[in-house]
Image (cartoon, rainbow, N blue to C red):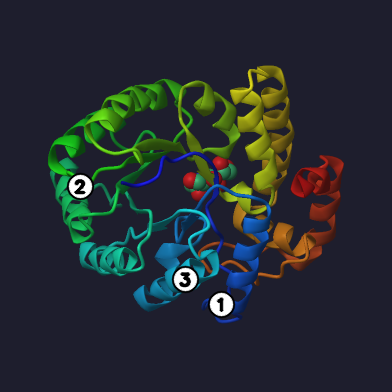
């Protein structure tokens, strides 16, 4: 039986070579850095990891390198979502062979309709039938509760969902389904919260773990935030969320992808540049960006 899901999971950024390929040496270094920060799990090749901007072969390489570096120390979920269902199926099979903790997949783009969405998800989940499957839900695109209820009927290995939306009412409804699901299914059953800005609220509503981009830069804040909340110190948890959100606001102001890469460079981890259509930060903005980070106490948060 899969282990119970808990805690702070970086949505691992994928270090790039100058031509947008995978810098596997830096990938190892970033993974090792985050493991040292005592993260609870890793989510790879998601939107932050630019999975859809990589080839199937490059995505397989990322999964192999990360699984090797992690060596069983924390659970790893592989995002396999792709435009073509058959690519996602290939990636799901490859992930299963690596003994990952879960497979996730973004909602199919271009509004294909709900029936096609069910089939897309059923097909991918069936490619790794013994691995928990997590649809990656962006709030608003579909009725998330309805979708999850239907997937519960159709996918025996459904593991819950990754919910990236700001609607905490909707998230709480998903968590209620989750609680019923955990009894029926397995201990890995979870609704991951994906909006770093809302982590404290998601925790209050019973989401056991969060996956997010800003955890590449400051995973310790989210670990402490959750620990404070679980210890009953809600005000301290809120204070940590507010401090993290000040950093997140700076990242958005400078363009989140370029800012994540530049932020890691500020911490001594040169992961290259994001791949188009994700924009790099302009050279003349970099000094101003670092000053803006300094002004919101970024280095203290990154040190946690
Ligand atoms: O799902 C990320 N969402 C997207 C995870 O990439 C769409 C989040 O971690 C955000 O990047 C983060 C900052 O807004 O909350």
Instruction: Point out the tag, 3 or 1, that comes first from the N-terminus.
Output: 1
Residue 24 got which mark?
Answer: 1
| Alpha carbons under labels 1 and 2: distance apart | 33 Å
The foreground one among 141 and 99 is 99
Element type where label 1 sits in the image: helix
Extreme residue in the bottom direction: 19
**Residues tagged 1 and 2 counted as in contact (Cβ below 8 A):** no
Residue at position x 23%, y 59% in the image: 128
Q: Which of marks 1 and 2 is in front?
A: 1
Instruction: Point out the tag, 3 or 2, that comes first from the N-terminus.
Output: 3
Element type where label 3 sits in the image: helix
The foreground one among 67 and 237 is 67
Question: Does the rendering let one see residue 29?
Answer: yes
Element type where label 2 sits in the image: helix
Q: Name the residue under label 3.
A: 62
Residue 117 got which mark?
Answer: 2
Residue 227 left/right relative to 185: right
In the depicted structure, whether residue 265 falls above or below residue 102: below
Q: How far across and down, in percent of the image, does residue 233 sit?
A: 68, 19
**Label 3 CB-ligand 1 distance < 8 A:** no
**Label 1 CB-ligand 1 distance < 8 A:** no
Q: How far across and down, in percent of the image, does residue 79 sit?
A: 38, 57
Instruction: Point out the tag, 1 or 2, that comes first from the N-terminus.
Output: 1
In the depicted structure, whether residue 39 falls above or below residue 273: above
Residue at position x 38%, y 59% in the image: 100
Residue at position x 54%, y 58% in the image: 12
Dividing the picture into quadrants, the one containing residue 187 is: top left
């Amino acid at each position: 039986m899969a282990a119970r899901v808990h805690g702070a999971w970086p949505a691992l950024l994928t270090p790039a070579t100058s031509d947008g390929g995978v810098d596997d040496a830096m990938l190892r270094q970033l993974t090792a850095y985050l493991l040292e920060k005592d993260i609870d799990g890793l989510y790879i090749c998601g939107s932050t990891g630019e999975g859809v901007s990589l080839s199937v072969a490059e995505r397989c390489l990322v999964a192999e390198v990360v699984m090797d570096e992690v060596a069983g120390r924390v659970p790893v979920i592989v995002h396999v979502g792709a435009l073509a269902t058959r690519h996602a199926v290939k990636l799901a099979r490859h992930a299963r062979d690596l003994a990952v903790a879960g497979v996730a997949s973004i909602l199919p783009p271009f509004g294909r309709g709900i029936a096609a969405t069910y089939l897309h998800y059923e097909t991918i989940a069936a490619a790794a039938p013994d691995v928990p499957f997590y649809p990656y839900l962006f709030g608003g695109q579909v009725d998330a509760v309805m979708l999850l209820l239907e997937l519960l009927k159709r996918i025996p290995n459904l593991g819950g969902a990754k919910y990236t939306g700001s609607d905490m009412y909707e998230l709480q409804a998903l968590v209620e389904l989750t609680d019923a699901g955990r009894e029926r299914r397995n201990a890995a059953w979870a609704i991951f919260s994906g909006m770093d800005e809302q982590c404290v609220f998601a925790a209050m509503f019973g989401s056991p773990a969060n996956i997010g981009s800003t955890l590449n830069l400051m995973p310790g804040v989210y670990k402490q935030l959750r620990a404070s909340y679980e210890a009953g110190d809600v005000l301290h948890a809120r204070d940590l969320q507010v401090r993290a959100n000040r950093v997140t606001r700076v990242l958005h102001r400078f363009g989140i992808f370029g800012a994540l890469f530049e932020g890691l460079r500020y911490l001594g981890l040169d992961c290259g540049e994001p791949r188009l259509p994700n924009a790099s930060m302009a050279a003349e903005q970099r000094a101003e960006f670092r000053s803006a980070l300094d002004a919101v106490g970024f280095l203290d948060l990154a040190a946690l």
